[in-house]
Amino acid sequence: MKQLDEEEVGGAVGRSPPRRDGPGKVTGRAKYLDDLTFPDQLWGRTVRSTVAHAKVKSVTFDPAFDWSGITRVTATDIPGENVVALIVDDQPCLADGVVRHCEEAIALIAGKDREQLEQALLHVKIEYEPLPPVFDLLHSDVAFKKYKIERAVETLPEIFAKAYRIVEGTYKVRHQEQMYIEPNAICAVPRPDGGVTIHGSMQCPFYIHRALQRLMKLPTEKIAVIQTVTGGGFGGKEDYPSMLAGHAALLARKAGKPVKMIYKRDEDVAATTKRHPAVIKHRTAVAQDGTLLGCEIDVVMDGGAYCTLSPVVASRGVLHAGGAYRWPACRIDCRVVMTNTPPNGAFRGFGVPQTMFGIEAHMERIAHELGLDPLELRRKNALELGDQTPTGQELLWSVAAQEVLDAAVAKSDWHRKRHLFESEVTGRKRRGIGLSLALHGAGFTGAGEVRLKARAGVELTPRGCRVLAISTDIGQGTETVFAQMAADSLGVNFDDVEVAIPDTSKMPDSGPTVASRTVMVVGGTIASAARALQAALASFAAERYGAEAGQVTCREGIFYATVPDSPAERPLAPFGAIASAYLDERGPLRCIEQYAHPPGIEFDEVAYRGDAYPCFAWAATVVELEVDLDTFEIKLDRVVHACDVGKAIHPVLAEGQIEGGTVQALGYALLEEHFYKEGRVINTRLQNYLIPTSMDAPVIESVLVEDPYPHGPYGAKGLGELPMDGPAPAVVAAVLHAIGALVPELPVTPERVMAALEAAR
Amino acid sequence: MSGELEVTSARSLGEAYALLAQERPGLRVLAGGTDLMVQIAARLGLDQIGHVLDIWRVPELRGLELREGTLRIGALTTYGELIKSPLVHQALPALALVSREVGAWAIQNRGTLGGNVCNASPAGDTLPLLIAAGARLVLGGPRGERTVAADVFFLGYRKTALAKDELLLRIDLPALGAGERLTYRKVGTRRAQSISKTLIAIRATSRDGTLRGVRIAAGCVAPIPLRCKQAEAALEGKPIDAAVLAQARLGLEADIAPIDDIRSTAIYRRCVSGNVLERLVRGLAGME
Amino acid sequence: MKLTMTVNGEARTAEVAPLKRLLDVLREDLLLTGSKEGCGEGECGACSVVIDGQLVNACLVPACQVQGSAIVTVEGLAAQGPLGERLSDLQRSFIEHGGAQCGICTPGMVVAAQCHLDAGGASTDAVLREALAGNLCRCTGYQKIIESVQLAAQGAR
């Protein structure tokens, strides 16, 4: 591991100060949207499609019903373009003429009295003329996007012809619901200038800002989007809030009053985005010793009825489809298709949990069919420094595949348990231990960051600085880690840094809070801006105290000047004194910087060649479990998750990300499944869509591996999504170890274990 | 939403009977609220609810005593009270154990045994135990009291023998005799707060590898919580061996009628119910 | 109905419909918004409060059943002194040890854990996991919640 400059490692980074938003959250004082009141505010409700695909012949507000006091909105009330602007302009904010999925919004109503609104909803009549729906992703012939990654494909026929063994497998994953505990919630407040201010639970304030400019036909300055305390997101509040904010804004504009819309749990589950289902086919040429020679991978993802973020999800999915391995030759195809189901979107991992499940379950199949040790198979083929990924990206730094495997194997007592469990074959329980290896590209794919030109920074306060970024804290601890990095980079104490509440009217656009980019990209930009702020103040201090500008630095709140020709330095003044003097004499000081992409990192988005990500984070998961041969139930005993994060800025928060991601992934592995009837989700409640409880979650031992990324702040790279990738295939591996049957699909329910055992007989 | 519903909070059995005597249309009884409040909040069947009779503070429906070999449990006894009761642990420990598997702690503090019975869900976790244990349900109303055996109380999907003007007052359970055991296994959808996929309960006396006085009941495998008489007959008085176990499984297969739903499949329920039955019988017969 | 009850040690009254959920009474009539609604059906536990010493889901309890009761909500856990708010050991432990992330489950979680400890409950991993099984958290994976409770319990003893 590369040693970092001593100078860069300051006081707060690498320690775990109490999180900034902690006191408000443990006392109930933190105000989520539902806890805020707005003067004269109305409640909004949505009239939704009950069919999957149809022409809308008419929308009738029953004349027999008393509509006084109720604001009604349909597509004709939209002042701008009827679109939820994101990537492709295919999704209307309110269906106009055609509905393409169940729960699609058709009309909106708002009123003071919630009971009256419920009655009113029953009096909006929609007349449909049915159109044929498509529900099965394999039967859809409409693709939102197709990708192909090719590496030495001309050699594939010969590789397959000469291979010791060709291993084939098909893997299937289903919808997963983000299931943040706070449902989507937005309030739109109309302004005297004709504009609108949005308050709400969200990940990406500027997504909403941009979508509203088009929908409401408003100039930038007439829209402000302000984040309220957000009760979880996981990707589920990346793009959907643009839709909800549009609805609230339309109602607020028409009513001339603030309109609050908070989804009930069942509405949130039925109508909002989920993880894309996928079917992944692998065909692999393997040498006798387990060396991977070449592969063909075909990925089909279900995008739902509208494009939303599907092209980007599929892109990340296909870029990770080959897993953490060296492929001399490969062909990877991917298409994301349209079906008449509610659109799928962002969910922690963003396409990778699907394709990583495919490759890692397939690695288990390869090991099983060739009689190889699954750990050795991975070690032999894992990417190393200097290797190339399927897109031809040469890995120049921070490749920790072997390190995370070492850490997970050691911590889990892998070898002993593997043998122990194999020797236990009596009774009605079988234990198993399995592992997976994953990588996760940190930050936006390809040229995303270059196009985005994220900006963030700091402004001087009398005690320290205030961080200015639009990146949202949705529980992961953004506020706290930003303050840590800004404090160390500026040279002040953690407590002297404030972090401003994200508000599009006051903050530079540091981009969306997605893609594990917050620490690495935005944090790095903030750290750089804080260093610039320190330099500006240092030269001010130098002038005042008669020192050379280059000789003044600030550490832990005190400015020092080096003494010429001596290792000693002399204290000049406390930070506060210099800052106050600066503010008095010269006025406000802001340093806003633009993210600088590492030099030489380039990606060809047409050929799908080159450096897809500036770096990758690595993880190895070991799952220990027990299968009951009477009920086929799986009891998780222990999970070890070794994650290479480059640098843990805040170890407690970093472990929290790993543990939380692990349990979400274990839910994906074992419990979480949606059922659809004619395109409509039928399990929309927490009682029938099951997420893990504290009794389902095993003891998790997270291991932080730190292989620094030279261009990340303090060596940090992305962390948030990484732990979502490995646990599901590790569960399949452990089940295979326990009972000798491979379950090639998720979730691994007792019903599927029973079927797999039946098939293996 | 709930503002429109008329509510009577009875403070005594007499007050409750007085309201029942009025035969109000759409009368619903509210005990711990763990089912009815969910239904009201979700507006499910709201138009069928005319009047709500709140019995939470009717003292006559509380209390738990062991008298002359019978455990008498007031209908409003919560799962939490069953879990903590030394009497239950002494007379029928399985009832305390199954109560711990209902919902989680906050639900156990409000949900009542009587509510579980009257709600009559085929997935009601205590119901197979009550049937297997030979529970007798004491019903009462303005017309008087009567007793119905638990195994004939459930008439169809969420339909019971309870008349419109009756309340469930008490559940009487014969305590276990010498050498007698009540055992069960719940197979649920997850490890806590789960709804059952199948639940099998058996009461029997075991001696020298033979079971006598066998009573078996199953949940989630038919429209009602079900007594499984063919499985019982296959086991009664026979030395337990592989052939008898196979007969018992066949009997159970004939007793039950599981379906596919969002929680599980018919084929899984059939197979696992048989496996669980076999495991429980082997345990009772000392074969494990 | 005229509802009279004690909330966090103070006598409170409200004019409410008898079936109004205690959760709504607390949030709307008493402006105590610390208790959250995550599901409205007793599954998530974000609305956990204590009634007469018993942990309940406030979304499932109608007003008519709490007449005269003593209620403790998350707002009642920290001590209010002359120097301002003083967090409980458990609250401090949640902040220090990563027990809270997005925070929406935290009020219910802290109330449930405090109720468990106050009842003399043990703080082994298995016991705590059962005691908190009615409080869903989607952020932490529960590990740091369990640790926060354990460390607070150890500190208090």
Image (cartoon, rainbow, N blue to C red):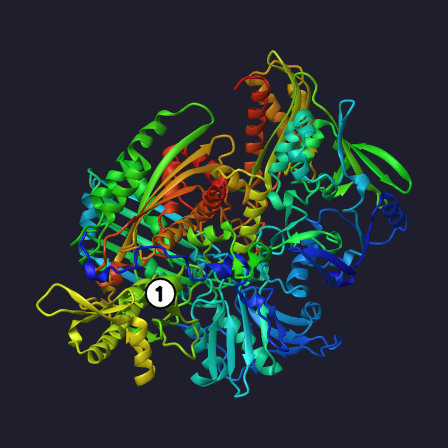
- What element does badge 1 sit on? helix
Q: Is residue A732 above or below residue A28?
A: above
Nearest the eye: A59 or A610: A610
Q: Is residue B66 visible?
A: yes
Q: Residue furthest bottom?
A: A193
Amino acid at circle 1: Ala
Label 1 CA crowd tier, 10 Å (few <14, some 14–19, many 20+) = many
Residue at screen point 20% across, 38% down: A288
Quadrant, the C terminus of chain A: top left
Q: Quadrant of residue B264?
A: top right
Q: Residue furthest top?
A: B208
Nearest the eye: A473 or A412: A473
Q: Quadrant of residue A50?
A: bottom right
Q: Is residue A500 left or right of residue B256?
A: left
Residue at screen point 60% across, 40% down: B196
Q: Is residue B193 visible?
A: no
Residue B171: image location, x then y, percent: 76, 33
Residue A665: image location, x then y, percent: 42, 49
Please give the chain letter of the residue carrying mark 1.
Answer: A
Residue A699: image location, x then y, percent: 42, 41
Q: Is residue A188 above or below residue C18?
A: below
Residue A294: image location, x then y, percent: 22, 49
Q: Is residue C128 left or right of residue A590?
A: right
Q: Quadrant of residue A291?
A: top left
Q: Which residue is mark 1?
A: A483
